[in-house]
Every structure is written in C-alpha cells, then in structure tokens.
Image (spheres, helix red, strand yellow):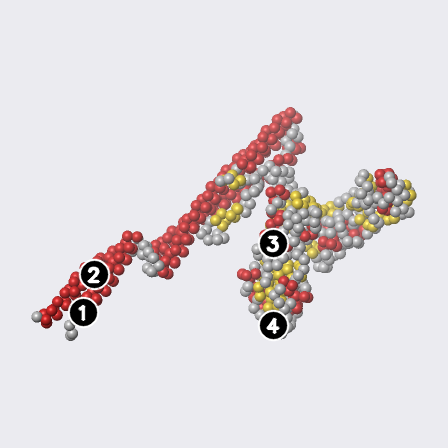
C-alpha cells in the first residue's frame, strides 16, 4: 500500500462521518428543543403541507366553536325576551276574557283597556329594543342571518327571527301570492325586467330588478325570479312582504323519433354530442344523461317524463333562468330540435342556430312567492305591472284572490280552461245568470256558479263582486237623447254644451229612474274627466247601448258590455293552473296562475279593543294567534340552541381528532429523538477520536526519512 503525506484519506473519511453525526445531532437537538418533528420544509415537505392544512382546519373549527357559542347567547337573549312577551300576552288574554263578561260596565272596560294599552306598549318596547351586540333581534329585521359554524366556506346555519311587534302579531298564518312565470323569450328578445315603479306593494313603489342581484343566470339575469325577489325584499321593512324564490321548471314537449345529432346548450354550456334515434325512450335517456353530466356547471337538471308527449323537463332548484338552445357545430346528421329531443325550446329559430350566441337561446323565467302576515295589496305603479308577473288586487289570508275585470270580449269559461287545486273547472252557462241581459255565459254570476259547482272538490268558493263600469270625460255636445242600459231605454236626457255637472246629474237621474228594471245604479263622480259611473251590486253584466243621444256627451262608458269579477276564497292555500284547452288563463279568463291564500283570519295585536264585549271577544283570536306565533318562535330558537350545542360537540370532537392526527405528523417522538441524540453524541465523540488518529497516521512516513 502506497504511503502519502499530501492527501490523508483517513482524515477526510473521519471528517465526513463526523459532519454527518454533527448534523444528525443538531437536528435531534432542534426537534427536542422545539418539540416538533417538522421545523422546516426540508424536514418533510409533504408532511408540512398536510399539517398546515390541518392547522387551518383546527384554528377554523376553534373559532367556529366560539361563533356557535355566540349564537347560543344570541338565541338565549331573544328567547328570554320572547318569554317576557309571552307573559304580557297571557295577561292580555286574561283581560280579554274579563272584558268579554257581561258583568262589566263601560267604565270597567275602559280601565281594562288602559292596562291593555300599557301591555301592548311594553310588548313593542321589548320587541324594538331587544338586541345582541347592537343587532336588533325581534323587530323583523333579523332575516336569513348566517352563523359560520365550520372552518370552510358555506358551512353555515341560517337563522330568521320573526317580528314580535304588535303590528305583526295576531294576524295568524301568512297569506301568499305566487307570481306567474314571466314566460319565455326567444334569443335576442326583450328582457322582462322590472323597472322602478312598475308595481306598488302595500303602497310602496318597488325598485328595479337588477342583473347584479343574480349571479347564477346565464342570460336575461335582470328578468329572473332571483333578481325580482331581491327587488321586493329590498323593501320588506316598508311593505311587510317577503319574496321567496321557487324552482324554475321547463316542462318537456312532445317528441318524435328521428336520427339526428348535435349538442345541446344549457345556460351557455355545451353537452357532449347527443345522438337521437327512432327509439324515443333511448333518446330521452341520452338527452337526460348529457344534460345532467354538466349540471354542476349549469345548475340545471333534466328529468325523463317517461312518455313521448312529456319529453324531457328541466329544473333549476335555485330559481335561476334556464337558457336552452341547440348547436349544429360538430354535428354530421343535421341539427337537433325540440321534436327530436323532447326539450321545450319554444321557437323554431333555435333549431337552426349554428353558434353559441344569445340569439340561439330561448330563456325561461321562474317564479317567486310573496308572503306576509297580513293583506298584500298589489297595485299598478307608474310602469308596467306585467313585468313583475303580478296582477293588481288585494290578496288576503282568506279572501285570497279576485279575478281581473279586464277580460276579453265575450270571454267565457269553456270546460277544462283552467284548474283549481288540480280539479278542472266546467263551462260557464248562461242558464246560471238570470239577471244579465246580454252575454250571460260571460258574466261573473255564471263564472262563480261554474266554480262553486265543484267547490266540494276544490275547497274554494267564489263570490260575485259588484260590477263597475267607469265613466269617461263629458263630450260637450248639446241637445237631448236617451241611452239603453241592459236593454231598457231611459227617459230623454237634456244635455248642455258647457254645464257638464248638470249633464251628469240629468244622466244619473234618468238611469236611476229605471234601476228597478236594469239592476244598475248610476253614480255622479263630480269630476268632468270621470263622468258617470255605473254599478250592479249583484254582479250582473252592465250593457250600455246608444239610444237617440251620444253616450260620450252623457259621461258614460263607451257602448258595450262590462262583465264583473269574482273573489275566490278558501281556508287553505289554493292553486290556479292552466287547463287542457290551451286558453290563456290571464288574458282570456282574467285569472292569474299561481298559489294564493293559506292564512287564518285575525286582527293585528295592536288593533285589539277591549273597551267593548264584542271587541274583547274578537281580541281572543288575535291574542291566541300571537301566542301561537311567539311559541313557534321560541320553539325555533330552542331548536337553534340545540343545533348550536350539537355543532359545538361535533366541532370539538373533530378538532380533537385532527389535532391528534397533526401531532402524529408534526410533533417530536421524544423517546426516538433522545435515543438519536445519544447515538449522534457518541458518534461525534468517536468521530473526533478517529479524526485525531487519522491526523497522526502520516507521522509514520517520517520514519522513512531518517
């Protein structure tokens, strides 16, 4: 073996091993001093990433636990306040029972009313001033508030607290009005968005529906049920009416088998190529499969109706618009169409679309439901009420729906035109109207009879309202003339070219002189622009025909027949739907497709009057409704507290298990690291000794030089 002086291989080897043992010793000391197995990414990069994610989850769940505890505190605060309101309501009920007794004098009841007034003020004070960390809880503003009870987005509990003020308590269940679907617009068509002032709710003008309120719809977002509901809810504190969004549904259409191929566009997302064949059942299955494969991106699911006539229906559970189109790009055997797929595209233009532009889509709009604990009054605003999908009228818990007076000429009910609670309504018959002189089958009387004929099946009763024929501005013609009301000619009416008040008075007198024959009463509006108004209290038609004079000069409505309206009522919610004849229920029948009513009668708590026996008796219903409402709210808050408690238990268990899992990845095993430290220290001592020996090994070469 050769002998070297310049290069000491043994020393280099000893140094290398000593460095390794020193590094291992330093790592062992770092782990023992920090308590962590992973102190930097070089120790275990994958383990570091995993443990950091676990740390995020643990810290998030720790905060979520605190959030849930805060939620319990909030619910306890509200529940305690409701307990005090319950005590006041119980005392009010005692006073009502006392006041209703015949032994009380007027003075006694006045004293009872004074105490009741103070109790009502205290209820309003508690409801208005109960708050948690500055947030009011019982004044009706605490709606759909989310509590973050998880470490990740969307892990929330939504809580709503109903108003406990005397204005809202006592009225019983909420009345409800479902807006009809705004329908469908072809690609490039006008969007039926609401403009500010289109509709008034309880006297409050509703603002415009904005596309920014709908982050889900692919097209025409401003006209969606989501955007419209947001517009109504922006005014809830003023109107007392809340809008909720219903699922958007597009019924399928009749289909025939044909060999076609292409892609279907749903909300701007293309399906894979769909092949249709003469086997319609297989085609529906293929269409459903293709659409549902992209439902996570479109928000739309497809359902096979199981029949050729029903085709394939589409549903968007969140109420977003559904845009449907067919694209020929990539197809080799002509385009898909409604007829071949069973999808309702509602326009021929879609079947020839070749690009993914909006013009190649038809967009279907969903519905929303307005609900309130009291009457909902819907009025035409300064714009177009049809943009809201609503019809003017007052929708009450029991008298829930009044048909429109704006019916098309000679409008009658044909058998099967529409359904109430799923039951087809029969034909309106002239024989049921013994009062009207013309168009008997179109009258409110005959229509109410048709509805009432099956009220035993529907649970809905129809009541005839007073028929009103509004007048017009006086024409200003001089002379004299007659007019025919329900076929009866009046006496001659003297008309002045300038004295319109005298003309109205003369017209009213002449018409009322024959009201015993016509069933029609004339009313002087005392307004030159409104002329003379005619009314038929029994709901018969009012037929106006020219006699020897000019109708406009008399301030009467133009010649023709005015039909009345009917009010539908039920103790439960009821639904009006299109029938089997294809008749437009709104324009032809004056009805509005939707769900109405469902409330109980009762006055608001704030309006009870215990100063009379009758008022005290009526107040019992309001107080019982109020107690029921408060008890329901307390029950809900109790359930929320239990839910928060369960959530806390689950979070703590999960956090404990995650902490244990993180510890196994991240923390130091002191037994193993202590042994490693001892091993490296011994190796360092041995390495140092061997390095000294290696450094001395070259001394033996010097003996050769002596």
Q: Which numbered marker is on residue 683? A: 2
The mark lying in front, picked from 3 and 4, is: 3
Whether residues under marks 3 and 1 lie with C-beta atoms below 8 angstroms apart, the answer is: no
Q: Label 4 to label 2, Cα distance in Å? A: 75 Å
- The answer to whether residue 150 is seen in the rendering is yes
- Please give the residue where the numbered disc 4 appears in the rendered image: 331
Which badge, 3 or 4, is on the more N-terminal residue?
3
Write down the residue under mark 3: 211
Q: Earlier in the sequence, mark 4 or mark 2?
A: 4
State the residue at coordinates (64%, 39%). Answer: 602
Q: Secondary structure at mark 1?
A: loop
Category of crowding for the residue at label 4, using alpha-carbon neighbours closer than 10 angstroms: few (below 14), some (14–19), many (at least 20): some
Crowding around mark 3 (Cα neighbors within 10 Å: few <14, some 14 to 19, many 20+) is some
Q: Which mark is residue 6?
A: 1
Asked whether, in this view, residue 46 is left or right of residue 247, the answer is left
Quarter of the figure with residue 585: bottom right
**Residue at 59%, 68% in the rendered image:** 263
Q: What SS does tag 2 mark?
A: helix
Of discs 4 and 2, which sits in the foreground? Answer: 2
Q: Are marks 1 and 4 in contact (CB under 8 Å)?
A: no
Q: Report the front residue among 516 and 525.
A: 525
> In x, y percent, where is residue 387?
68, 52
Residue farthest along the front direction in this orientation = 705
Task: Give the image location of residue 403, x and y in percent.
Answer: 72, 49
Residues at marks 3 and 2, CA–CA distance in whole angstroms: 73 Å
For the residues bearing labels 1 and 2, Cβ distance under 8 angstroms: no
Query: Which of the marked residues, 1 or 4, is nearer the chain's N terminus?
Result: 1
Tell me the mark number nearer the camera, choosing from 1 and 4: 1
């Amino acid at each position: 073996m050769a002998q070297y002086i310049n290069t000491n291989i043994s020393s280099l080897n000893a140094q290398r091993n000593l460095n390794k043992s020193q590094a291992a010793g330093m790592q062992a000391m770092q782990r023992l001093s920090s308590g962590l197995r992973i102190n930097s990414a070089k120790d275990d990069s994958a383990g570091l990433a995993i443990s950091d994610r676990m740390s995020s989850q643990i810290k998030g769940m720790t905060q979520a636990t605190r959030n849930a505890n805060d939620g319990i505190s909030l619910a306890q605060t509200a529940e305690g306040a409701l307990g005090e309101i319950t005590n006041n309501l119980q005392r009010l009920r005692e006073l009502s029972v006392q006041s209703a007794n015949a032994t009380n004098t007027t003075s006694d009841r006045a004293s009872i009313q004074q105490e009741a007034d103070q109790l009502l003020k205290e209820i309003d004070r508690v409801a208005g001033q109960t708050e948690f960390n500055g947030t009011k809880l019982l004044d009706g503003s605490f709606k759909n508030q989310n509590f973050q009870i998880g470490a990740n987005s969307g892990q929330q509990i939504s809580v709503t607290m109903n108003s406990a003020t005397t204005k809202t308590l006592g009225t019983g269940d909420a009345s409800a009005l479902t807006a009809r679907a705004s329908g469908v617009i072809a690609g490039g068509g006008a969007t039926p968005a609401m403009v500010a002032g289109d509709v008034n709710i309880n006297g409050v003008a509703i603002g415009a529906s904005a596309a920014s309120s709908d982050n889900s719809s692919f097209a025409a977002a401003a006209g969606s049920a989501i955007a419209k509901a947001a517009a109504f809810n922006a005014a809830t504190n003023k109107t007392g009416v809340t809008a909720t969004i219903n699922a958007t549904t597009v019924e399928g259409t009749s289909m025939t088998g044909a060999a076609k191929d292409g892609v279907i566009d749903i909300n701007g997302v293309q399906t894979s190529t769909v092949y249709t064949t003469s086997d319609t059942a297989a085609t529906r299955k293929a269409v459903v499969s293709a659409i549902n494969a992209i439902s996570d991106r479109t928000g739309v699911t497809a359902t096979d109706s199981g029949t050729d006539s029903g085709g394939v229906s589409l549903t968007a559970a969140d109420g977003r618009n559904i845009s449907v189109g067919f694209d020929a790009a990539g197809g080799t055997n002509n385009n898909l169409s409604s007829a071949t797929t069973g999808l309702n595209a509602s326009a021929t233009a879609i079947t020839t679309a070749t690009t993914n532009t909006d013009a190649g889509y038809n967009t279907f709009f969903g519905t929303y439901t307005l609900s309130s604990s009291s009457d909902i009054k819907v009025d035409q605003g300064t714009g177009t009420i049809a943009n809201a999908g609503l019809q003017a009228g007052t929708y009450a818990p029991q008298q829930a729906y009044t048909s429109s007076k704006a019916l098309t000429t000679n409008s009658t009910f044909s058998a099967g035109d529409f359904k109430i609670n799923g039951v087809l309504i029969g034909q309106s018959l002239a024989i049921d109207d013994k009062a009207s002189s013309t168009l008997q089958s179109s009258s409110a009387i005959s229509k109410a009879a048709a509805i009432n004929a099956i009220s035993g099946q529907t649970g809905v009763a129809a009541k005839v309202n007073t028929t009103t024929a509004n007048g017009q501005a006086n024409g200003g013609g001089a002379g004299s003339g007659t007019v025919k009301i329900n076929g009866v000619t009046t006496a001659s009416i003297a008309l002045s070219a300038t004295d319109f008040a005298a003309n109205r008075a003369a017209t009213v007198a002449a018409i009322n002189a024959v009201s015993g024959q016509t069933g029609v009463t004339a009313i002087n509006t005392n307004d030159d622009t409104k002329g003379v108004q005619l009314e038929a209290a029994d709901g018969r038609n009012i037929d106006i025909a020219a006699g020897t004079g000019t109708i406009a000069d008399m301030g009467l409505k133009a010649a023709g027949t005015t039909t009345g309206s009917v009010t539908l009522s039920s103790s439960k919610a009821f639904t009006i739907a299109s029938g089997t004849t294809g008749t437009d229920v709104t324009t032809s029948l004056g009805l509005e497709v939707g769900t109405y009513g469902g409330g109980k009668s009762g006055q608001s708590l704030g309006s009870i009057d215990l100063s009379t026996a009758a008022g005290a008796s009526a107040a019992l219903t309001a107080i019982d409704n109020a107690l029921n409402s408060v008890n329901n709210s307390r029950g809900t808050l109790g359930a929320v507290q239990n839910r928060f408690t369960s959530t806390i238990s689950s979070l703590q268990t999960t956090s404990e298990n995650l902490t244990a899992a993180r510890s196994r990845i991240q923390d130091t095993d002191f037994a193993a690291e202590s042994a490693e430290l001892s091993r490296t220290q011994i190796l360092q001592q041995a390495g140092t000794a061997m390095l000294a020996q290696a450094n001395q090994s070259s001394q033996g070469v010097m003996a050769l030089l002596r």
